[in-house]
Image (cartoon, rainbow, N blue to C red):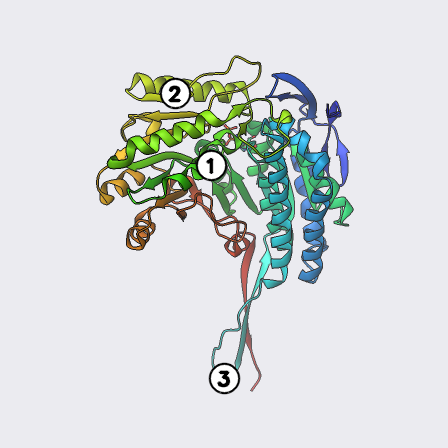
Amino acid sequence: MTEIKPYWKNYIDGAWVDGGAGRIDVINPGTGEKLAEHALADAADVDRAVMAARRVHLSGALSDLRPVERGRMVQAMGRYLLDRIDEIAPVLTLEQGKPLWEAKIEIKGAARYFEYYGNQAETVEGRSIPLGKGYFDFTTYEPFGVSAQIIPWNYPVEMTARSLSAGLATGNACVIKTPEMTPLTNAWFAHAAEAVGLPAGAVNIMCGFGHEAGAALSAHPYVNQVVFTGSVPTGIAIATAAAQNVVPCVLELGGKSAAIVHDDADLAAFETDVRRGIYFNAGQVCSAMSRVLVHDSIHDALVERMVGVARSLTVKPGIEQPEFGPTMGAMVSERQRDRAFGMIGDAVAAGATIAAGGRKPNIPGAFLEPTVLTDVTPDMTIANEEVFGPVVSVMKFSTDAEAIKIANGTPYGLVGGVFTRDLDRATHAARHIRAGQVFVNEWFAGGVETPFGGYGKSGYGREKGREALWNYVQTKNVAIKLKG
Ligand code: ADP
């Protein structure tokens, strides 16, 4: 059994501190039992962290460095995490619920962000713009200054890594508000920042309530840029607070992403996409494959395969799942599980059929069976609202146009997918699906290198890829009048 420290502190201006708002219990969703306590920041803690970050920014300790030097420190943070993967992964599993093997994948993914953005640090170059005789003009990109990053509970390590690595690589000092339910593993980012020699105040990490510390951070007048991943209502609150200070936001919000499966698709291969698309992290993924739109001629054959995938997965505490395999862990909390379970009940009352799963297993903890719902129609709530759990809704279509219409029929637009051997069909769908990323014949194809973000209510701004870097810098043009 992994030994967990009973009390974890916040990290502000290079020191480990208690929280002005007291402590919060961190629960192990795999058992329902208390795991540890974490310090809770209040508005005064947030203010200290922001002012420390501002001091670092104004000092030039990050922004004046030659980018390659910042890049090396960012890369070293990733290696620090990888070197401690066996220490971090069990804590992530115990606080979040995911299988231990998935926790390791998450930490490797986090390290990859530091590698990628560390590499990118010295690629943020401006242009020289010709203005005719007598002028010399060039463009530079400068860090905003203080980057505030509000982190969700589904991938606490990877989501912090995503924004922190890009923020530091471009020379910003960062203040991170970790999620209330899964704050523990973020401590390793503070240790990493110290280990690689970042100055005190360059990275501040604190847990606090969203309505208290989160709200104070997003509204702080010395925050220069806000990055948020989470729900639509919280995204709106944060963007509204940022707008009062006229600072930009990156919002990565929810999704109700659809896979369109045509009659010429490789159905055997699609089983892997279902496995990954909706049952990784117990479906608590913003880009989850939460809708499958299937051509009516292959509906029954595909459902049979999807039911086979759902039933093949054993559901048990993540800590008992060290090796990759047909297993799924707990959801993050009983509240989230009950919400998803309630949505299944409402869907059945509205006419959907449970083809697989749909029950709470009779064990302690926040478990829900991998679920497949059929007889779903586009007007149902289950077809439009995010479940954020291991629940996939299957709908039928008969023409390509109908499939695209259903895919585009929600207010979201994070990702989408099309499964076909026909290139024309695939490219037509890729063009017409309204989403920031379209997968053809493999759900989650792409990686850290590929830009990711939403259309519509799924948010704005892009994470990942080179595109993300432009969220962390502001453009300055220098126009010089030459003599003679
Ligand atoms: P969920 O409801 O699934 O927990 P949220 O979008 O509310 O998702 O939470 C994501 C992150 O946003 C968490 O770190 C949470 O503390 C934070 N948060 C919640 N409410 C606010 C708010 N009003 N202002 C700033 N941050 C918030």
Toward the viewer: 51 or 5? 5
Residue 79 in the image: x percent, y percent?
A: 71, 48
Query: Please, is residue 62 above or below residue 179 in the view?
Result: below
Toward the viewer: 293 or 77? 293
Disc 2 designates what residue? 344
What residue appears at the point 35 percent right and 35 percent down from the top-left corner? 292
Toward the viewer: 28 or 374? 374
Earlier along the polypeptide chain: callout 1 or callout 3? 3
Asked if the residue at tag 3 contacts the one at tag 1, i.e. Cβ–Cβ closer than 8 Å, the answer is no
Asked if the residue at tag 2 contacts the one at tag 1, i.e. Cβ–Cβ closer than 8 Å, the answer is no
- Residue 1 is left or right of residue 482, and the answer is right
Image mark for residue 417: none
Answer few, some or many: residues within 10 Å of disc 2's Cα (few below 14, many 20 plus, some between 14 and 19): many
Q: Label 1 is placed on what type of residue?
A: Cys
- Residue 406 is left or right of residue 240, and the answer is left
Residue 9 in the image: x percent, y percent?
A: 73, 30
Query: Please, is residue 126 above or below residue 413 in the view?
Result: below
In 3D space, how far apart are the residues under numbered discs 3 and 2 (Cα atoms)?
69 Å
- Residue 389 is left or right of residue 262, and the answer is right
Q: Answer whether residue 221 is visible to the viewer in this image.
A: no
In 3D space, how far apart are the residues under numbered discs 1 and 2 (Cα atoms)?
18 Å
In 3D space, how far apart are the residues under numbered discs 1 and 3 (Cα atoms)?
52 Å
Image mark for residue 133: 3
Q: Quadrant of residue 298?
A: top left
Disc 1 designates what residue? 286
What residue appears at the point 35 percent right and 29 percent down from the top-left corner? 304
